[in-house]
């Protein structure tokens, strides 16, 4: 068990306060992990500017595209471990109704944003139930598919993961939130909000604990417990690309489980499968191969900063202002949650200041931990 000294905790808190004061967000929640342990949660600023409620450790945030890795990529790996999915199989095996060349693209292409699908889906008209929307979505992207390249270029796409979420539902014969929520760790892990939480789950996810955020539509109404992404809301808050809510500690514990699985210390994950899914040699490829099975890697001027090792670090960003980075070799983990769409906050300011806090944590906290536990 790693116990941070009070002086180190105080310095981390001061740095997070500076991050908020620099205008990155009205409030922030930070969780850190190292090797086998989660080592600290820190909070700063305001969660709800309408009434001055501060960010606390149990404040839930809209995780946005962190859903892509926490749910969809991870459960694709789980299906692979259960021999239910082969990453290089064409998706027509799971969706035989496809007629365009999309049917020959593979699960791996969807994961790595190389399927030739567009970045977003705009035809979110009311066509009935979620099941009817699923069928409508698949038909629409199939009919509109025009990519003829054998190896399409990388184009970051929500549509890839919307489709992959549908494929996972076909494979598991359940909705995403059903098999996701039935796994271990219900009381800390992120959850699909869907705006209404009932029963046992409501005890850990009361609506008053959800940090509100502004909608992106005209009039900018407040959203609290409703996912900001309009396509995820169209899918009733449960989609492969967005929809999860969570705390920084919940994201950190998911990241810890992944790290433990990679190093053969998990009862849930096979280390052989995790290493096949996330091969370090693939992470060291050129900048043209930015993604590894849906996980982002530090490349160019990265939001991960400059000090996390590129060859072994994976993570992701969420449009709402969330992020997670994991060094799969050393075990350094940083989960940072904010909401950048609030009155008085310039959304681009987060991009300017976030790399700095990652570099500070690696240089001033993790480097000393690695020296101490060498």
Image: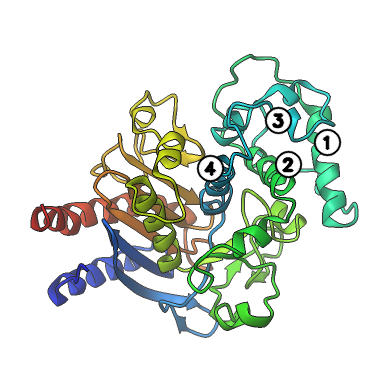
Residue 246: give x, y in percent of width and height.
Answer: 51, 67
Residue 162 x/y as whole percent? 68, 44
Q: Is residue 102 above or below residue 254?
A: above
**Which residue sits at x=46%, y=55%?**
268
Which mark lies nearer to you, 4 or 3? 4
**Viewer-proximal residue among 106 and 333:** 106
From the viewer's perspective, is the residue at label 4 or at label 2 nearer? 4
Q: In screen coordinates, is 374 left or right of 229? A: left
Q: Position of residue 234 (x, y in %)?
A: 77, 55
Spatial separation of the CA atoms under disc 3 and disc 2: 19 Å
The picture places residue 231, in percent across and down from the top left corner, at 71, 51
Give the distance between the C-alpha atoms of the residues marked 1 and 3, in whole angstroms: 16 Å
Task: Give the residue at x 75% y 60%.
Answer: 236
Callout 1 crowding tier (Cα within 10 Å): few <14, some 14–19, many ≥20: few
Estimate the spatial distance between the alpha carbons at disc 4 and disc 3, rounded to whole Å.
18 Å
**Residue on which disc 1 sits:** 140
Residue beneath label 3, please? Answer: 91
Q: Earlier in the sequence, mark 1 or mark 3?
A: 3
Circles 2 and 1: CB atoms closer than 8 Å: yes
Q: CA distance from mark 4 to mark 2?
A: 30 Å
* Labelled disc at residue 121: 2
Badge 2 or badge 1: first in the primary sequence? 2
Horizontal side of residue 165 vs 262, given as left or right: right
The numbered mark at residue 109 is none
């Amino acid at each position: 068990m790693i116990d941070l000294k009070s002086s180190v905790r105080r310095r981390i808190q001061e740095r997070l306060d500076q991050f908020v004061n620099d205008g990155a967000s009205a409030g922030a929640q930070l969780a850190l992990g190292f090797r086998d342990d989660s080592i600290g949660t820190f909070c700063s600023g305001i969660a709800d500017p309408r009434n001055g409620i501060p960010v606390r450790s149990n404040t839930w945030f809209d995780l946005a595209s962190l859903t892509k890795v926490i749910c969809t990529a991870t459960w694709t790996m789980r299906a692979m471990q259960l021999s239910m999915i082969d990453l290089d199989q064409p998706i027509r095996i799971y969706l035989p109704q496809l007629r365009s060349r999309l049917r020959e693209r593979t699960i791996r292409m969807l994961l790595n944003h190389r399927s030739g699908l567009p970045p977003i889906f705009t035809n979110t008209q009311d066509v009935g139930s979620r099941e009817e929307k699923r069928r409508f979505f698949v038909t629409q992207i199939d009919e509109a598919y025009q990519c003829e390249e054998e190896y399409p270029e990388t184009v970051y796409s929500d549509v890839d993961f919307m489709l992959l979420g549908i494929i996972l539902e076909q494979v598991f014969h359940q909705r995403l939130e059903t098999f996701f929520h039935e796994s271990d760790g219900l009381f800390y892990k992120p959850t699909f909000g869907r705006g209404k939480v009932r029963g046992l789950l409501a005890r850990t996810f009361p609506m008053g604990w959800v940090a509100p955020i502004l909608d992106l539509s005209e009039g900018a109404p407040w959203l609290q417990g409703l996912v900001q992404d309009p396509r995820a809301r169209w899918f009733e808050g449960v989609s492969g690309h967005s929809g999860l809510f969570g705390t920084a500690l919940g994201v950190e514990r998911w990241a810890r489980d992944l790290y433990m699985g990679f190093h053969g210390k998990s009862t849930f994950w096979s280390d052989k499968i995790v290493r096949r899914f996330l091969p370090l040699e693939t992470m060291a490829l050129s900048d043209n191969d930015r993604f590894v099975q849906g996980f982002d890697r530090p490349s160019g001027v990265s939001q991960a900063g400059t000090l996390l090792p590129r060859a072994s670090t994976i993570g992701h960003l969420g449009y709402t202002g969330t992020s997670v980075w994991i060094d799969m070799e050393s075990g350094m983990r940083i989960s940072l949650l904010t909401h950048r769409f609030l009155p008085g906050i310039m959304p681009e300011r987060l991009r300017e200041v976030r790399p700095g806090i990652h570099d500070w944590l690696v240089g001033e906290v993790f480097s000393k931990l690695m020296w101490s536990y060498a």
